[in-house]
Image (cartoon, helix red, strand yellow):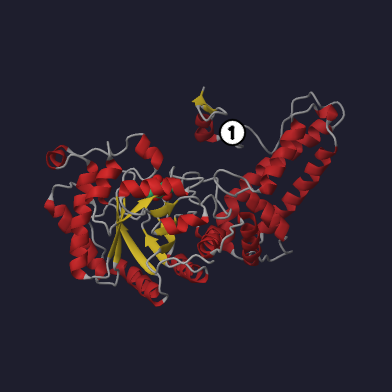
């Protein structure tokens, strides 16, 4: 049976990451993808749009409203729900009534251009109330619920069709466990926030490998409503070396019926989100089986069409292998794992005992080299630019390993020190970030130590 999701189920994309917001032209492109993949929502909340967060009190100047208004119209034409998010939590004084008036004023301007759905976000903010707020509320949850309820009532008085979403300060289980937001945060919120207001939840973690049904049922009980999943599975703003093009995974199909929506906050680089969006759409429409690897391969076949070059064509298998090296936060794809196993396997042995795997690796490294050259010839330059750092990094490391293996394989070199003229100290893996990274090392049990 295909999933029968209620008409008000939210599915789509959150532009909610740190870093440069997407371009207006990319957002328009996104609408086509949303429609194509059967998704119905776009959420505007880029952390680094000043008027979304740091300058949340300031209305848009008329010239700034032009693109927004135009985009909202386009969303309406495509039957995509546009959600505008405000994040006042960095410095709001909950007990100052003027602050609520400012929020209303911001929404008033946005209502006037056709926006009906709003979100109020309290993520990534100080979790203690100021002295004056403490005189009025016992907890951040109570203060935040008060502001959101007031705003919701005001929005309702303007349009019955309004909807409000709320992002709590602890928005995953680990944050709750660590006491963020104070005792009983979720229970207070569940009790005090008007039931129709939706609450975002990212799962057990900020970046959740899995979100189980049991976990969501437990959250549902505490929030007294099913949450809307803010899914950071494909978000990459926390590590600029990585991006994720693996399939939507780690969420059972039953999850769809246990939540009020699933919205993905994906890679910062817009062109890298083809597979994340396609597989989310397919997951939401899937019948009783979700074969994530098969979905990935199908999606890769479709994405391959974007990889036309000015030279020789890019081989689909090579693209799959590259994608397997940029799969998901907690797992490589098959080919990524195979490469690691191959290289680690023979490098664990003394070079004089190396066998056929070395030849296999060197052959593969040549193939990688050709692939990297082909990628520089992509016609779709914004796609190439989004990939270029990752191509560069992978090329550097595979090339270094190949040089090492070639050197050590030469008679008499097995125990000699190896140096590469192309991977010199300071310019290869240089800089203070690398130096700092090398101070505390992660152990196998996840702890960090000197
Ligand atoms: C977060 C931020 C989000 C960011 C993501 C991944 C939420 C609710 N907030 O904590 O803006 O993109 O992690 O780094 O997820």
Q: Quadrant of the N terminus?
A: bottom right
| Up-down relation of residue 238 to residue 271 (above or below) | above
User: Does 79 sit above or below residue 341?
Assistant: below
Asked whether residue 103 is in view, the answer is no
Residue at 36% across / 54% down in the picture?
226
Decide which of 382, 222 is in the foreground and name it.
222
Q: Is residue 354 visible?
A: yes
On screen, residue 34 versus residue 128, left or right, reads right
Where is 276 relative to 116, above or below?
above
Place of residue 254 in the rendered image (x, y in percent of width and height, measured from the top left): 49, 56
**Along the viewing direction, whichever of 40 and 284 lies nearer the viewer:** 284
**SS class, disc 1:** loop
Residue drawn at x 81%, y 38% as measured from the top left:
358
Q: Does residue 2 appear left or right of residue 339 in this picture? A: left
Q: Where in the figure is residue 204, as x and y percent of width and height? A: 43, 43
Q: Ligand 1 closer than 8 Å to the CB at disc 1?
A: no
Crowd class of label 1 (few under 14; some 14 to 19; many from 20; radius 10 Å) = few
The image position of residue 171, as x and y in percent, is 36, 45
| Residue visible at 72% across and 31% down in the picture | 419
Q: Return the residue nearer the eye: 112 or 277.
A: 277
Outermost residue toward the bottom?
77
Q: Nearer the viewer, residue 29 or 3?
A: 3
Task: Residue 321 in the image: state x and y as whole percent.
Answer: 69, 52
Residue at x-position 52% and y-position 53%: 252
- Residue 440 vs 6, above or below: the answer is above
Residue lying furthest right in this view? Answer: 411
Residue indicated by mark 1: 426
Total marks shown come to 1
């Amino acid at each position: 049976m295909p999933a029968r999701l209620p008409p008000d189920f939210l599915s789509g994309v959150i532009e909610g990451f740190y870093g440069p917001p997407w371009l207006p032209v990319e957002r328009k492109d996104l609408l086509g993808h949303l429609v194509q993949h059967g998704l119905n929502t776009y959420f505007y909340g880029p952390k680094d749009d000043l008027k979304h967060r740091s300058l949340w009190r300031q209305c848009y100047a008329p010239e700034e409203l032009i693109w927004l208004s135009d985009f909202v119209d386009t969303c309406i034409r495509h039957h995509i729900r546009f959600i505008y998010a405000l994040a006042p939590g960095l410095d709001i004084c909950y007990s100052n009534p003027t602050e609520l008036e400012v929020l209303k004023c911001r929404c008033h301007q946005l209502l006037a251009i056709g926006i009906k759905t709003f979100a109020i976000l309290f993520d990534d903010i100080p979790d203690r109330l100021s002295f004056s707020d403490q005189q009025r509320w016992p907890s951040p949850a109570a203060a935040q619920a008060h502001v959101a309820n007031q705003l919701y009532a005001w929005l309702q008085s303007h349009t019955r069709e309004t909807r409000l979403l709320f992002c709590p300060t602890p928005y995953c289980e680990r944050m709750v466990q660590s006491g963020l937001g104070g005792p009983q945060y979720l229970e207070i919120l569940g009790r005090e926030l008007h039931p129709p207001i939706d609450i975002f939840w990212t799962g057990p973690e900020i970046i959740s490998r899995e979100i189980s049904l049991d976990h969501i049922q437990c959250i549902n009980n505490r929030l007294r409503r099913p949450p809307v999943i803010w899914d950071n599975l494909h978000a990459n703003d926390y590590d600029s070396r990585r991006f994720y093009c693996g399939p939507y995974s780690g969420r059972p199909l039953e999850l769809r019926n246990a939540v009020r929506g699933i919205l993905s906050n994906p890679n910062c680089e817009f062109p890298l989100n083809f597979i994340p969006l396609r597989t989310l759409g397919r997951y939401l429409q899937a019948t009783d089986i979700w074969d994530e690897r098969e979905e990935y391969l199908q999606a890769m076949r479709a994405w391959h069409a974007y990889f036309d070059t000015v030279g020789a064509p890019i081989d689909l298998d090579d693209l799959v292998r590259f994608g397997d090296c940029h799969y998901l936060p907690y797992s490589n794809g098959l080919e990524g794992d195979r490469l690691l196993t191959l290289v680690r396997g023979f490098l664990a042995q003394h070079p004089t005992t190396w066998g056929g795997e070395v030849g296999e690796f060197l052959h593969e490294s040549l193939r990688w080299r050709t692939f990297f050259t082909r990628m520089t010839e992509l016609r779709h330059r914004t796609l190439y630019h989004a990939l270029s750092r990752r191509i560069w990094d992978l090329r550097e490391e595979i090339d270094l390993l190949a040089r090492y293996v070639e050197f050590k394989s030469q008679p008499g070199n097995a125990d000699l020190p190896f140096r590469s003229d192309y991977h010199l100290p300071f310019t290869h893996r240089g800089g203070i970030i690398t130096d700092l990274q090398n101070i505390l090392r992660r152990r196998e049990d996840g702890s960090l130590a000197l």
